Image (cartoon, rainbow, N blue to C red):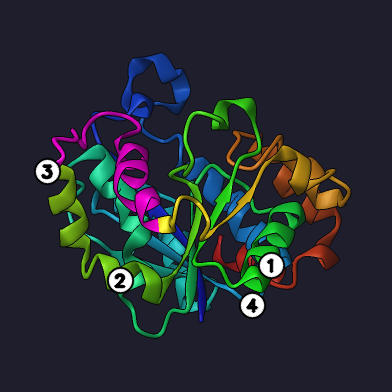
């Protein structure tokens, strides 16, 4: 099985818990669930979506709809415990590595929209048989070899090197990486995981050029992979084009 892995939680060290977020304070990420649940069946119909979460997000009014969606088989909700650190919780996205039923998984952000352009890159990664996927679709993505929310792994390759999630966290402690600092999960990936990729030789690496043009109508709904976008146009698009999402009726009933 292949898994599209997300981490959904709240932590006070997050910039999105700051008053600077205005009306989005404390509820920024939940707003994106309506979009990704519609896009996933259109782009990744043969991949499972797993959402690792804490207890605080269960307090959102929309959580009841998410539970109904899980019951309908749209995705899997996995309680990962209390979000003790900001980036330690972001690293929950790696947890499919330690499920023997998982062959491959990708780590993505809740506020990143699945697109056909991205899926084509993932399929090229699978065809390459390389153990690691890395996507870079913006100048802002040039600062690191592995982006926290734009990577993928062969599960057996990953767990052979890091036997558990706790081992990953232990390595961060040994390297004196502050997991409450924004971007620390990415720092850890590049300090610990990237050196295990044979100098990058084991990485299927794609940037804006190799990813190609946004030729599909669904590609137009997101600025770039990993980029923020407006949810309302995505929901409106599927409402007006119900044939693009095979699960739309189920999603609507759950909401």
Residue at screen point 39% across, 71% down: 157
Rounded to the nearest whole Å, what is the CA distance between mark 4 and mark 3?
37 Å
Q: Residues within 10 Å of mark 2 (few under 14, many from 20)?
A: many
Task: State which tag comes first along the sequence, 2 or 3.
Answer: 2
Q: Can you identify the residue that label 1 sits on?
A: 123
- How far across and down, in percent of the image, does residue 34 sit? 58, 51
Rounded to the nearest whole Å, what is the CA distance between mark 4 and mark 2?
23 Å
Q: Secondary structure at mark 1?
A: helix
- How far across and down, in percent of the image, does residue 211 sit? 75, 47
Q: Can you identify the residue that label 2 sits on?
A: 159
Residue at screen point 67% across, 72% down: 127
Depth order, front residue of 82/240? 82
Q: Residues within 10 Å of mark 1 (few under 14, many from 20)?
A: few
Task: State which tag comes first along the sequence, 2 or 1.
Answer: 1
Part of the protein shown in magenta:
173-196
Res 38 visible: yes
Q: Secondary structure at mark 3?
A: helix
Placement of 96 over or under 168, stated as above or below: below
User: Is the residue under label 3 in contact with that under label 4 (CB below 8 Å)?
Assistant: no
Q: Can you identify the residue that label 3 sits on?
A: 173
Res 57 visible: no
Q: Secondary structure at mark 2?
A: helix
Residue at the farthest bottom position: 101
Task: State which tag comes first along the sequence, 4 or 2.
Answer: 4
Is 228 positioned to the left or the right of 160 in the image? right
User: Is the residue under label 1 in contact with that under label 4 (CB below 8 Å)?
Assistant: no
Task: State which tag comes first along the sequence, 3 or 1.
Answer: 1
Residue 156 falls in image quadrant: bottom left
- Mark linked to residue 46: 4
Residue at screen point 59% across, 59% down: 37
**Magenta stretch: includes residue 223:** no
Depth order, front residue of 58/220? 220
């Amino acid at each position: 099985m292949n898994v599209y892995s997300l981490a959904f939680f709240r932590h006070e060290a997050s910039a999105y818990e700051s008053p600077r977020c205005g009306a989005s304070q404390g509820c920024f990420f939940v707003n994106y669930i309506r979009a990704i649940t519609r896009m996933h069946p259109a782009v990744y119909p043969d991949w499972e979506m797993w959402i690792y979460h804490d207890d605080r997000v269960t307090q959102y009014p929309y959580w009841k709809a998410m539970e109904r969606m899980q019951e309908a088989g749209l995705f899997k909700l996995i309680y990962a415990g209390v979000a003790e650190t900001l980036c330690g919780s972001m690293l929950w996205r790696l947890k499919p590595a330690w499920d023997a039923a998982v062959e491959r998984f990708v780590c993505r952000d809740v506020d990143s929209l699945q697109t056909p352009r991205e899926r084509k890159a993932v399929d090229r990664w699978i065809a390459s048989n390389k153990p690691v996927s890395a996507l870079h679709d913006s100048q802002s993505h040039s600062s690191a070899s592995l982006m926290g929310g734009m990577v993928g792994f062969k599960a057996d390759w990953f767990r052979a090197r890091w036997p558990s999630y706790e081992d990953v966290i232990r390595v961060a402690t040994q390297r004196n990486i502050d997991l409450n600092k924004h971007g620390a999960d990415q720092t850890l990936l590049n300090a610990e995981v990237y050196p295990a990729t044979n100098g990058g030789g084991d990485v299927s690496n794609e940037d804006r050029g190799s990813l190609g043009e946004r030729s599909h109508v669904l590609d137009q709904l997101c600025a770039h992979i990993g980029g923020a976008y407006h949810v309302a146009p995505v929901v409106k698009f599927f409402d007006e084009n119900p044939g693009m999402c095979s699960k739309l009726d189920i999603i609507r009933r759950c909401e």
